[in-house]
Image (cartoon, grey):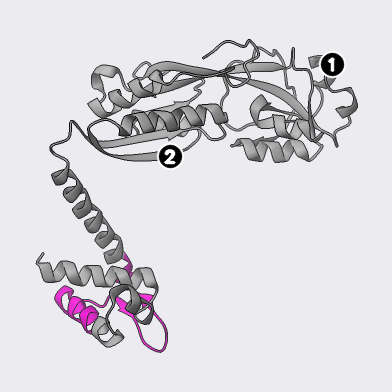
Amino acid sequence: MSDLDLRLVRVFLAVVEAGGVSAAQIALNVGASTISTQLSTLETRLGFRLCERGRGGFQLTPKGAVFAEMAYGLMSAISDFHQGARSLDKQLVGNLRIGMIGHMPAEQNSRISAAIARFRQRDEAVRMTLLVRSPGELEERLLNGQLDLAIAYFWHRAPSLHFTPLFTERQEAYCSREHPVFSRAGSLEAEDVNRCDWAWRSYPLPDTGLAGLPSHVGATADNMEALAVLIFSGHHLGFLPRHFAAPYVAQGLLAPLNPATLCYDTHFFAVTRPRRQISAVTRAFLDDLLAIPVEGIDAGSGDGKKA
């Protein structure tokens, strides 16, 4: 690749991102005829047509679409090279890929933000990536090396992973005000609602300790918002984190069936590969996360203890 090739590739990507030659003039600060000439030069050097352009509009050819993906990869690799070369004098250099489960308590999200701020004060040059996924996918990505650290609850502990306790979250059973049992909510027992239609998670859960409940699951959901929608329908009962349901309870839209008995706790962990196998970057961030104090109660676990 010559400097000319790289410049022409950048022109091509600018046209792709703008959606046409005319639209790319402002971004490239050159006229449409110059851009068209540069695209033609690149196509000549490659030996195939990248895009259709003209009165019929702009459209990538099949080969052009593949070339665009390759070109984006090239530009990313060049950026990584530049960042790495500039950062070699730093103590911590590399990538940090963090996975999280969605709808965590606000105080725990703040804790993670504080850990990031603390980490950024180190002598580091680290590119950080955050993903929100289900517990099962987080575990899979940890095991295959696509994540460095995950924060979630897990229904079993893979022996090849290291689990550091973070906090406990209280889950309670709820009904909406449209449900027939709403007027009796607060003092219902398992036998009162066992035959009702329940909405449940589509992924495995930790042991709830509620033997035989529920006996009938009429709907499943793979995230908290979808589960809440099913409960709001007035047809299904379901478990939600107490912190998630609290605003709806305050508005009279949801009610806990029995906060004392129809509930269970989920334990959240920071999960990595064994410490001897993780990078210095991951180890430093985990240390910073654990150094952040947890103020107040722990996500509504009901016992008032800190995580």
* Residues rendered magenta in the picture: 37-65
Q: Secondary structure at mark 2?
A: strand
Give the CA separation, mark 2 to mark 1.
Answer: 39 Å
Compare residues 53 and 15 and report the one nearer the observer. 15
Relative to 190, is 100 above or below? below
Q: Quadrant of residue 95?
A: top left
- What amino acid is found at the position of numbered circle 1 in the picture? Ser
Compare residues 220 and 111 and report the one nearer the observer. 111
Q: Residues within 10 Å of mark 1 (few under 14, many from 20)?
A: few
Answer with left or right where residue 180 lies relative to residue 21. right
Q: Quadrant of the N terminus?
A: bottom left
Task: Write the residue at 36% across / 87% down.
Answer: 54
- What amino acid is found at the position of numbered circle 2 in the picture? Leu
Answer with left or right where residue 166 lies relative to residue 142. right
| Residue to which mark 2 is pinned | 131
| Residue to which mark 1 is pinned | 187
Q: Is residue 293 magenta?
A: no
From the top left corner, tell me how far across and down residue 222 is, in percent. 59, 37
Number of marks drawn: 2
From the top left corner, tell me how far across and down residue 166 is, in percent. 47, 18
From the top left corner, tell me how far across and down residue 80 is, in percent. 21, 48
Q: Is residue 51 magenta?
A: yes
Q: Secondary structure at mark 1?
A: loop
The mark that comes first in sequence, 2 or 1, is 2
Task: Write the residue at 13% across / 39% down.
Answer: 88
Q: Residues within 10 Å of mark 2 (few under 14, many from 20)?
A: few
Compare residues 18 and 203 and report the one nearer the observer. 18
